[in-house]
Amino acid sequence: MAAGLDSLEECLERHLPPAELAEAKRILYGEAVRQLDLPSAALSAATEREFDLQGYGFGAEPEQLRPPRIVRVGLIQNKIQLPTDAPVAEQVTALHKRIEEIVEVAAMCGVNVICFQEVWTMPFAFCTRERLPWTEFAESAESGPTARFCQELARKHNMVVVSPILERDTAHGETLWNTAVVISNTGAVLGKSRKNHIPRIGDFNESTYYMEGDMGHPVFQTQFGKIAVNICYGRHHPLNWLMYSLNGAEIIFNPSATIGKLRYHLESCLFAAESGLNYDLVYVQGHYL
């Protein structure tokens, strides 16, 4: 059975009666989430554009003096659109076009803050140790083509955008970083957060491309709450979550390009919800890399 096991959830759902399944999920994940009633137009558009669309609601403990705030968060897990030997610029453009289609559906669902997967504008090539062509996907976090693209999306849809990219830091010798750029719903670049733990597991070592980030644990004030970004492998370090929370984060994203069986650890996001905050999650899943 182990060879055919796609996920823990699938195994539990296959073998546990409904009451026991609900209790097992409560122990593993906490309070049960509710399914969102998403617009039929959005569901139809997702089917036509060949990606999955799901939505869940997360409640919070009510407060006595403040009314609840509802923030709708969108997560996108995409796949590459062209063969990896296609020209770099064409690969990036194809991914921009695909994400634009998906974000339009997220906007139909009323998403306020959307987060893309880790280094979403390129194939996840960091296991190869080959410099070219993969480092050519790196770009400026503030003024590169992806930043401009995301600024347009943010303004068009009144949506905060979290865009993880491979950053080229031209101000410091063109150093590369694994970076998440945070863009306001007005289109302003609020800042960036850099991956602060690098996996070195056996022969897999991402420090061939970039090292640990140097920006600490930044938190960004947006119209829809204070957000932070704990990139990929940083999720395994509890002090990361603590520091982002102590710095005031109400939502902590964890963009990752994890695939296969590992993707069921964490898809794309974790939340640190302050009392009085209620979150809707719209999960847009393209096919995996």
Image (cartoon, rainbow, N blue to C red):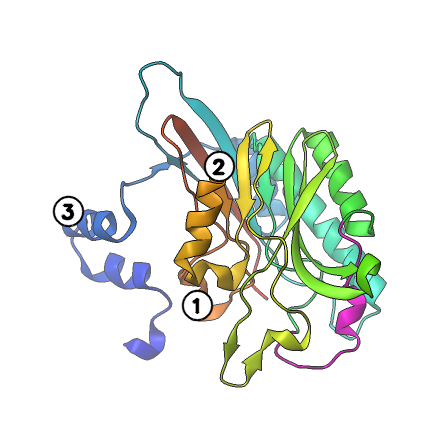
**Spatial CA span between label 2 and label 3:** 37 Å
- Mark 3 or mark 1: whose residue is earlier in sequence: 3
What residue is shown with label 3? 19
Asked if one can make out residue 54 in the rendered structure from this viewpoint, the answer is no
Secondary structure predominantly adopted by residues drawn in magenta:
loop
**Spatial CA span between label 3 and label 1:** 27 Å
Question: Is residue 135 inside the magenta stretch?
Answer: yes
Asked if one can make out residue 183 in the rendered structure from this viewpoint, the answer is yes
Could you say which disc has been placed on residue 170 in the image?
A: none
- Mark 2 or mark 3: whose residue is earlier in sequence: 3
Question: Is residue 136 inside the magenta stretch?
Answer: yes
Q: Are marks 3 and 1 in contact (CB under 8 Å)?
A: no
Residue 210 screen position, x and y as percent: 67, 69
- Numbered disc 3: secondary structure: helix
Three-letter amino acid code of the residue under disc 3: Ala
Q: Residues within 10 Å of mark 3 (few under 14, many from 20)?
A: few
- Numbered disc 2: secondary structure: loop
Is 61 situated left or right of 53 in this image? left
Could you say which disc has been placed on residue 248 in the image?
A: 2
What residue is shown with label 1? 262
Span highlighted in magenta in the image:
126-141
- Mark 1 or mark 2: whose residue is earlier in sequence: 2
Residue 135 screen position, x and y as percent: 77, 70
